[in-house]
């Protein structure tokens, strides 16, 4: 059994399709098929049933993916240790971040890291607070950066930066006149466009309202949208108010396409996540240190 055979097996298992796995691995389909048949032949087992040009796990195959994935992760961990012993000249660092952080705060630090350690492959995945936390728990990411709150005993959570939340509207919206709004105005007035449940922006906004005695259930939420950009586009239409990060809204505020509503929301923390039981690698520690330095 070779690591290449295990990697091919896992790729095929994830996609249930030989050709798509071959494309992901940059191999010819015949090479993928040959590797699977060699693995099955050597141990005298079949792992897949070949059905209508697709591959379906049989009973043997359903028992094997977890073991194969665990072996590959251990091998990757050993490779990273040796790479780090070489002085951060080679290696891989996987980071998961929520949308606002990934789009507006983290890239400058990633560029600085790359300039200092060009041999380290820095991989970024983007999700919301909930999916980022899950990735770190599962070992799919070495570090996570989130805007919201997370409650998981497996995670160490540290503040890393501050951000402001704003209620924004189009220039023709009634709330664009600058008059101060009270918390009850949010329930009785305009419809709102918000990020989806699970996003840090949504959870922090709702926590701020609860602290002032307003249940989020009383809001008139017209749309729940999965990205900051579409939330901003909806707000620019003028019919609804939106809640976004100040860094996300800054370009449109500067152009006059959006106006910040006179309603104060507390600053929120950007948080760093890592697994309590997995020591930070040298490369992860270096990125964290960079993120704590002023730009």
Image: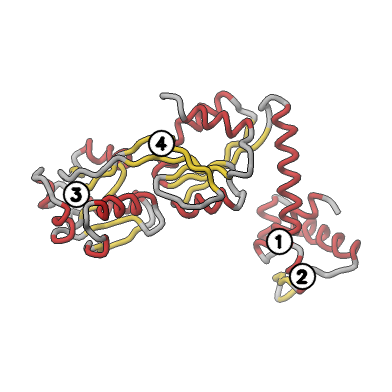
Displayed quadrant of residue 117: top right
CA–CA distance between discs 4 and 1? Answer: 36 Å
Vertical order, 6 against 253 (above or below): below
Residue that mark 3 sits on: 169
Mark nearer the N terminus (4 vs 1): 1
Is 223 on the left-hand or right-hand side of 60?
left
Q: Residue at x 70, y 70 (%)?
A: 54
Mark nearer the N terminus (3 vs 1): 1
Residue that mark 4 sits on: 105
Q: Residues within 10 Å of mark 2 (few under 14, many from 20)?
A: many
Q: Position of residue 179 (x, y in %)?
A: 8, 45
Vertical order, 288 against 153 (above or below): above
Q: Quadrant of the N terminus?
A: bottom right
In the drawing, what numbered circle is on residue 12?
1
In the image, 3 versus 52, the foreground residue is: 3
CA–CA distance between discs 2 and 1? Answer: 10 Å
In the drawing, what numbered circle is on residue 48?
2
Q: Residue at x 22, y 48 (%)?
A: 167
CA–CA distance between discs 4 and 2? Answer: 45 Å
Observer able to see residue 124: no
Mark nearer the N terminus (3 vs 2): 2
Is 107 on the left-hand or right-hand side of 167?
right
Most extreme residue toward the bottom is 52
CA–CA distance between discs 3 and 2? Answer: 55 Å
Q: Report helix, strand or loop for mark 1.
A: helix
- Choose mark 4 or mark 1, whichever is in front: 4
Q: Residue at x 22, y 35 (%)?
A: 254
- Choose mark 4 or mark 2, whichever is in front: 4
Q: Report helix, strand or loop for mark 4.
A: helix
In the drawing, what numbered circle is on residue 71?
none
């Amino acid at each position: 059994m070779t690591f290449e055979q295990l990697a091919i097996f896992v790729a095929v298992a994830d996609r249930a399709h030989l050709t798509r796995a071959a494309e992901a691995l940059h191999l010819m389909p015949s090479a993928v098929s040959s590797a699977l048949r060699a693995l099955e032949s050597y141990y005298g087992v079949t792992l897949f049933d070949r059905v209508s040009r697709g591959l379906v796990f049989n009973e043997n195959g359903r028992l094997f993916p977890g073991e194969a994935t665990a072996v590959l992760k251990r091998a990757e961990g050993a490779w990273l240790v040796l790479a780090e012993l070489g002085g951060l000249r080679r290696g891989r660092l996987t980071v998961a971040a929520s949308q606002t952080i990934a789009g507006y705060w983290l890239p400058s630090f990633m560029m600085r890291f790359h300039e200092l350690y060009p041999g380290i492959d820095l991989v970024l995945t983007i999700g919301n607070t909930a999916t980022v936390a899950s990735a770190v728990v599962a070992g799919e990411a070495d570090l996570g950066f989130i805007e919201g709150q997370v409650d998981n005993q497996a995670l160490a959570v540290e503040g890393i930066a501050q951000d402001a939340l704003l209620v924004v509207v189009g220039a023709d919206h009634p709330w664009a006149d600058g008059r101060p709004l009270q918390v009850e105005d949010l329930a009785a007035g305009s419809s709102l466009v918000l990020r989806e449940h699970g996003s840090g922006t949504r959870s922090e906004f709702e926590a701020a309202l609860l602290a002032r005695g307003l249940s989020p259930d009383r809001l008139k939420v017209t749309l729940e949208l999965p990205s900051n950009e579409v939330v901003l586009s909806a707000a620019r239409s003028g019919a609804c108010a939106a809640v976004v990060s100040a860094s996300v809204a800054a370009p449109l505020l500067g152009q006059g396409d959006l106006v910040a509503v006179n309603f104060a929301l507390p600053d929120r923390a950007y948080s760093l996540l890592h697994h309590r039981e997995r020591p930070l690698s040298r490369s992860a520690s270096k990125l964290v240190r960079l993120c704590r330095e002023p730009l």
